[in-house]
Amino acid sequence: MSATPIRIKDVAGRDVMLEKVATRILLAQGRHLPALALIHPDPVSIMAGWQSDMRRQDPATFELFRRKFSGLDAVPVVGDGIPENFAIEKALSLQPDVAILSLYVAGLRRGSSSTSAVIRKFESAGIPVVVVDFFANPLRDTVPSIRILGQILGREQQAGNFIEFYESHLSRLRSTLETNNPAKPKVFMHAHAGASECCYSSGKGTFDDFITVAGGRNIAADAIPGSTGQISLEFLLANDPAVYVATGGAHLASGGGLMLGTGAAPDAAGRRFGELLARPGLAGLSAVSSGRAHALWHMFNDSPSHIVALEWLAKWFHPELFRDLDPAATMERLNGFSAVPLEGTYWVEHP
């Protein structure tokens, strides 16, 4: 590994220098562990500490990593992913080579200053901070974030290999849509489906970006002032989308919501999705009666694995145009990069 200084510009636009390749990292966004696993064979071995939001928000994937890396239980926990619960003094005491923060944990927003109180505390203690992100603007920040992780961990070749895979798949989507310029179907993304009253959805932001890139038009984008929010069933029925996409995950299990993701059985996921579509209101949507209602794992929204979700969306929005696209094969290739391949049910096509 290189002992020469490493100079990078992180996704917040900050110039950062590390004295050498990092071997002890603080992972301040626990959900980024699967991203690390795409380029490192044992990411747990280099973790000086982390926040446990992955365990709270995606317990099944956490258990998958825990089975592969028993040392995960011994990694010091410095918070649960909620900024106000971040135990910064404990994090500083671990003396990591670098603190890897997301925009959310760093307290940064698009267009804001590139520093914050959290960043200043680490820097005052002589601990460099690197900001990477897969959530706020994934189509802009995923490639630079993977490249940055490769640089600071001495895994540049592995990062480059994954970036080549990711960019080739994204480029195919974009070029096909640009060449054919199909009409954009009206789409409704039902977030955390089934766990609360209809209908929680995506405004501007991550899932809206996914819908747009895949060639659709998000009917909730102008109805919700922020990145997420509630719309009425009456609004949904009046706008009657051509395509309905629900999102679900293990975090919805106890509330009767849509179960998808790591450890989810195909039959159980399909059954829950069928029950969801049979609910009053949703059953009357054209998308349901025409066979254009589908479901995706919600946690695609903060991971480079979202390339699989993009391919499913494109295929569902434009089935003739993307008849030969195989997102399941893309998932297999993505798993080939990872030290911990994902196992479960991550999508449901119309039952």
Image (spheres, rainbow, N blue to C red):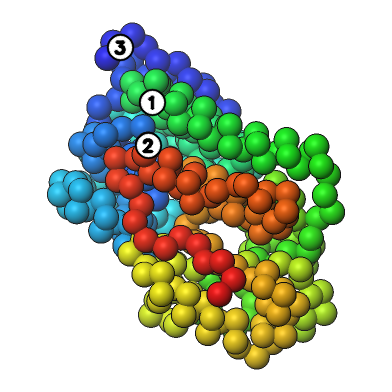
Q: Residue at x 81, y 55 (%)?
A: 184
**Which residue is denoted by mark 1 in the rendering?**
158
Indicate the quadrant where residue 179 lies.
Answer: top right
Q: Is residue 55 above or below residue 267?
A: above
Determine whether, in the image, residue 184 is placed left or right of residue 74: right
Q: Residues within 10 Å of mark 3 (few under 14, many from 20)?
A: few
**Which residue is denoted by mark 3 in the rendering?**
2
What separation in Å lies between label 1 and label 3 (alpha carbons)?
16 Å
Kindly identify which numbered label has been placed on residue 231: none
Tell me if label 2 and label 1 are in contact, CB under 8 Å: yes
Q: Mark 2 belongs to which amino acid?
A: Phe
Can residue 61 be seen by looking at this rendering? yes
Q: Residue at x 53, y 49 (%)?
A: 327
Q: Residue at x 15, y 49 (%)?
A: 70
Q: Is residue 99 above or below residue 278?
A: above
Sequence-earlier tag: 1 or 3? 3
Residue at the bottom extreme of this rendering: 280
Sequence-earlier tag: 3 or 2? 3
Q: Is residue 340 above or below residue 346?
A: above
- Could you say whether the residue bearing mark 1 is in a helix, strand or loop? helix
Residue at the top extreme of this rendering: 4
What separation in Å lies between label 3 and label 2 (alpha carbons)?
23 Å
Indicate the quadrant where residue 172 lies.
Answer: top right
Q: Residues within 10 Å of mark 2 (few under 14, many from 20)?
A: some
What separation in Å lies between label 2 and label 1 (alpha carbons)?
9 Å
Q: Residues within 10 Å of mark 1 (few under 14, many from 20)?
A: some
- Could you say whether the residue bearing mark 3 is in a helix, strand or loop? loop
**Which residue is denoted by mark 2 in the rendering?**
337
x, y percent for residue 36: 36, 38
Observer-side mark, 2 or 1, equals: 2
